[in-house]
Amino acid sequence: MAEKSDLPQGTLDLLILKIVALGPVHGYAIAQRLEQVSRGVVQVPQGSLYPALHRLENRGLLAADWEETESGREAKFYRLTRKGQTQLETEAASWQRLIDAVGLVLKLSEGGVE
Amino acid sequence: MNWWQRLLRRRKMEDQLEKELRFHLDQHVGELIARGLSPDEARRQSRLALGGPEQVKENCRDARGTRWLEDLQQDCRYAIRMLQKQPRFAVVALLTLALGIGATTVMFTVINGVLLKPLPYSDSDKLVAVNGKSDGWNAEIFGEQNVAYLDFLDCARESRSLTIAAALYNGGTASEPGEPEYVDLREISSGLFSVLRVPIVQGRSFLPEEDRPGASPVAILGNGFWQRHFAERADALGSSVVLDGKRYTVVGIAPAGLKLFSDEADIYTPVGQDTARYLRNRAAHPMHVVGRLQPGTTLSQAQTELALLGRHLAEQFPDTNAGRSFQVRSLRPKVGNIGSKLWLLLGAVGLVLLVACVNVASLLLARAISRERELAMRAALGASRGRLVRQCLTESAMLGLAGGLLGVLIAADGIHPFVRMWPGALPRAEEVRVDWHVLLFAFGISTLSGLLFGLAPALRTPFRNLEQKLRIGPRGIAGNSRRLHSMFVISEIALAIILLVAAGMLGRTLLHLSSLDPGVDVRNVLVTRMALSPATLADPAKTRAAWKDVLARARNVPGVQSVATVDTFPMRAGDNEEGYWTSADVPPTNKLPFALMTSVSADYLRVMRIPLRRGRFFEDHDTLDSTPVVVIDDVLAQNAFGAQDPIGKRLWIPDMGYGGNVFEIVGVAGHVRHWGLAGDDQAKVRAQIYYPFAQLPDSFMHRWSELMSIAVRTKIPPLSVLASLRSELKGVAGDQVLYEVRTMEQLANESLAEQRFLSLLFGIFAGLALLQACIGIYGVLAYLTGQRVPEIGVRMALGATARDVIRLVLRQSLGMIFGGVALGIVAALAAGRVLMQTVDGMQSNEPSTFIIMIPLLLAAALLASFGPARRASHVDPVTALRQD
């Protein structure tokens, strides 16, 4: 029973890929970053994070290894695969295109009102 | 990690998932405590943030992509547990399915072997048959036209697209080694074995230089002959056999089971050594020609080339080859018209299987409804609808597969008895076995039937009004399930009726056919083919004398009443047809009406007790020097002359080849069912003409004598004269043999064997269907009345008697039964039409069939309903009311 995320469909995957791209990272750290990055704007329920991580791993976009954290505990660290890298680039680009296009449309209508 | 690794490491993955989530929670808790929250509050908040750990885990498992497999495992285990809990249901369902699938698989195994398998030669798709083609040929009556030997030689030399070879059917008496025996002989061109790519097991195939006139006589032995006469000794090679008085050196042994053109030959000889005149005559077409496409050529190239060769031959030899050419087709196994019967039987067992499926479906549905509360509970706990449907389908697919497995075991065991029971010889019987095609088929139909009977119960999985269903439980039976149940019973009854009526039609047909007058008195008649001593066949005068001697000697055998020679006798495969006309301006051959030609001696009518309607039969004064005469049968008299008296009229038979082809009709005999009791009415050629053997010219003597049989009427059981007949007719050299010995009674019986076999099978199928329909009715009614126990309790509390309750239940069952009967009658009428097209001599669907079969079904169905009804009438109102 996935709770509905307020993120637009598919953006969660994109955000995760972006965060993991910065360097190997475990699930909790991803959740924290997500929260920092999007604080006050979007809410990412932690419950949908792990299924998304597992799905991305399953699709070969992420790889995972068990490593020790600074505190000495074992945690599952995710890193981007080459396939994930390409996926990130294409999705980021298409996201950008979408935003540009939506922005353009919004400006147009504002111009119409003035 | 691919999916199966993931599946195998399921335990490890689960541990890791658990560990990962715990790490997350611990980190979160730690951070919150660091911010100043109490440990309890921190733990509470972090749990809230993550959501229910079990749900997160479920979602992660879903994301893994091996979910369906894990579920499948789980469902299978669950299904097995459910079946174990209800052994009675499991046994009934498994048995009915196993029978249905087993029977269907047996039929498919036969169809696969007889119709679908390619010929047993390597690269058999490159093999072709070459046939003659001419305008005047009536292929419908005579079948495919063969090829003249000289034309074959020309094609073999000229063709670039094909390597061709030829075979000639023949027979002869093998007098050494061992007992003289009439053998099946193939005269073949030297290339036949290599064209077919059949390896010679010992020795070698014929050399091209042996396939010429004057070459030293050589032979290849058929495997069966080698076993019988040489006990499979290797020194057969280089020894000799004597065939029709001529000594042949054995150069090779053919492999076992080699059936060129549908039956196994005893001896092969090179056709090129045969100096018979008809082989040098382009107007005679005795050769069966097969070919192999050269690498890189196509069938259509070969067709074009052979057509062209045919045109050249027609220009070169206009007298014999004008309007004549060749056609090339892919070589197919010869199986006659058996295909339609096999498909008919597959259809019938398919119906039995369908009844089984419906039956299991209704039993499953009843279970599904009583399990509704359980399923609703699982839905409420978060199982998706797809998941529940999948679980139900897994259960039924497992039932189907288990039934299929049993069915394949039944089929593997039952296929050989079935093939042996097949009336006559099943063509290509040696190809009929359970192979991977069959297994694939069985797997396919098992899964299919599993899905078929699982679908209705599966789609009923509860997903709406869960709360209500959980509350009222299994007693709350919805009206649409009752309708679904009725539909199941109705279709089961309808299917059973189709099979019952079909069985009834076949049974009636059998009765009708066996009551028919075959036109001859079949009791106490022995018929056997006879081969004269090869020495006498060389001289026509000797041949005539030999036949006279045979008749005279046979007549003196104790117990024999009368005896005649005959070339083709009734109810046996074998016939000779000619076109005839009643005036001198004879139209082209393919426009002529045809009649069966039978060459007989004077006593034939007396031996067979065929009634003479008019005029006279042949007498001793019908000789070579007197007017050529014929006797016709009722049918021809009616067809050609109507009400006129045919006696003294003349018939023109253009292809007779003697007597100027004009014959005087001297008598009319009763019609004889030549094609067997069943086949005669539908036969393409029914009219009959008898002509006297004594009037045949010398040039006919050899060929006709090879085909001759004798018919003997006895005063004692006919087979008891056989031994003395054999020894009396052995001839001076002891090499005259009787072969293919039968009594007319056997032949008449065999002519109905197919109908008898089909009625037996349909009877069994109908019985099975009826039994299953009864089980179905019983199960459904027991279930439906069980659901109505509280209602019945109320009725009884309000004063209804046991009799009222029985009536109530029976009324419900009667509704279903009559619905099924109505539907079944319509379907049975359609099925009857299919039967009439497929089975010879089939009687049309008459009301009487229905009048017998339907009460039978009604009685059985009511009997099945009576149990549940009686049980309902014993309901104790108090317990019933307290039940909910």
Image (cartoon, rainbow, N blue to C red):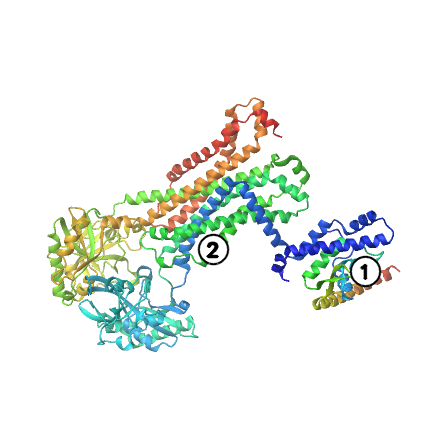
Q: Nearer the viewer, mark 2 or mark 1?
A: 1
| Residue nearest the observer in this picture, B84 or B703 | B84
Q: Position of residue A69 (x, y in %)?
A: 77, 61
Task: Sort mark 1 into few (<14), some (14-19) or many (20+) by Cα contacts within 10 Å.
Answer: some
Residue that appears at 29% across and 44% down? B514
Work out whether B774 lies above or below A108. Answer: above
Q: Is disc 2 in the same subunit as disc 1?
A: no
Quadrant hosting residue B292: bottom left
Which residue is pictured at 50% across the width and 45% down the height?
Answer: B357
* Label 2 environment density (alpha carbons within 10 Å; few <14, some 14–19, many ≥20): some
When asked about the image quadrant of residue A96, the answer is: bottom right
Q: Is residue A41 visible?
A: yes
Please state which amino acid type lies under the numbered disc 2.
Phe
What percent of the width, then of the height, locates residue B836?
A: 38, 48
The quadrant where residue B133 appears: bottom left
Residue assigned mark 2: B441
Query: Viewer-proximal residue, B286 or B403?
Result: B403
Query: Where is mark 1, residue-wise?
Result: A33
If the image is split into quadrants, where does the C terminus of chain B sit?
Answer: top right
Front-most of residues B185 and A19: A19
Q: Could you tell me the amino acid type at mark 1?
A: Arg
Left or right of residue B831: residue B253: left
Task: Let me know if residue A1 appears in the view.
Answer: no
How far across and how far down the image is residue B448, in percent? 52, 51
User: Which SS class for mark 1?
Assistant: helix
Chain identity of mark 2: B
Q: Residue furthest right?
A: A114
Residue B86, x across and y down, in percent = 53, 40
